[in-house]
Amino acid sequence: MTRPEEDAGPLTAKLEAMGHEVVMVPLLSIRPRDGVAIPDLRWQAIAATSANGIRALPKAHGLTSFRTLTVGPQSLKAAQAAGFMAEAHGGDVNGLAAFIRAELDPKAGPILYLSGAETAGDLEGQLKAAGFDCRRVALYDAAPAETLGAIARELDTGGLDAVLLYSPRSAKIWRGLVEGAGLAAKAAPVRHLCLSRNVAAALPDGWNTAVSASPDEAAILELLEQTA
C-alpha cells in the first residue's frame, strides 16, 4: 500500500478483510502549508482533485456554502465530511476539466482550485484555456519517501505479490527507490496495479503492470482480485 498514511488506513482495513496481508509503504508524506491565504471572492465553484486539498484547508475558511466539484469517491468523501456541498465528476483531472467546460459558464464567476504544490494534471491551465477565471491555491506539499524501508527485504526475498500505485508521481518515486536500492530486477515481475495509464507509463518497460478499468478505488480492487 503506497498511499499517504491519511488515505491508507481505511483501504488497508478493506484489503485485510478481503484476505490480503498488507504492508504500508507511504511514498508521499502530506504536509499542510501554514499561512495560506484564500481570496475572498464569490466563487462559482470549488474544484478539488484530492482529499488532501480539502483536509489541508485552514480553519474558518468559510467555503462550505459554495458548490464543490471533486474527482472521485475519496475526494468526495473528504469534502462531504468537511461540510461541503460536494459532487464527484470525471474520475481524474482531465475528466473534471471536461465536466466543468461542458456544464459551467466562464461568465458565471471564478473557480477556486484547491491543490498541492505538485499536481498530476493541469486543471488550472485547461480551464483558463477555456476562458474560465481559475484561481489555484496550493495548500500542501507532498514530500517523497527517501527509502523503501522494511519493504526492501520483502522485495529482495520475493515476498511481495502486488504494488498499488495511484499517481504518476508515486509511480516515479517507487521506481526511483527500487532502482536506487538495486532491486529493479526483483521488482519487474511483481504485479504493479495502476490507477491509470499515466501511472503505468511512469514505470519501466518490461515491468509487470496492469491498469484498472476506471480511475477509482473499486476498480483497482477489482483488478487486484482478478490478478490474484
Image (cartoon, rainbow, N blue to C red):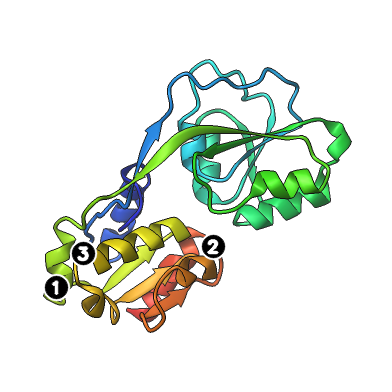
- List x then y, in percent, for residue 186: 21, 78
**Are there few (<14), some (14-19), or many (20+) residues within 10 Å of tag 2?**
some
The answer to which quarter of the image holds residue 227 is bottom left
Amino acid type, residue under disc 3 in the picture: Glu
Is the N terminus in the top left, top right, bottom left or bottom right quadrant?
bottom left
Who comes first in sequence, dot 2 or dot 1?
1
Q: Residue at x 14, y 68 (%)?
A: 154
Disc 2 versus disc 1: nearer the observer:
1
Q: Which residue is mark 2?
A: 215
Under tag 2, what secondary structure? loop
Who comes first in sequence, dot 3 or dot 2?
3
Disc 3 versus disc 1: nearer the observer:
1
Q: Which mark is residue 179?
A: none
Q: Residue at x 38, y 84 (%)?
A: 206
Q: Which residue is mark 1?
A: 156
Under tag 1, what secondary structure? helix
Under tag 3, what secondary structure? loop
Is the C terminus in the top left, top right, bottom left or bottom right quadrant?
bottom left
The answer to whether 100 appears left or right of 5 in the picture is right
Residue 34 vertical position relative to residue 179 in the rendered view, above or below: above
- List x then y, in percent, for residue 106: 84, 39
Can I make out residue 167 in this image? no
- List x then y, in percent, for residue 9: 31, 47
The answer to which quarter of the image holds residue 163 is bottom left
Question: Mark 2 touching mark 1, by CB under 8 A?
Answer: no
Amino acid type, residue under disc 1 in the picture: Asp
The answer to whether 31 appears left or right of 134 in the picture is left
Cα–Cα gap, marks 3 and 2: 23 Å
Amino acid type, residue under disc 2 in the picture: Pro
Q: Which residue is mark 3?
A: 21
Residue 61 vertical position relative to residue 208 in the rendered view, above or below: above
Q: Residue at x 45, y 68 (%)?
A: 202
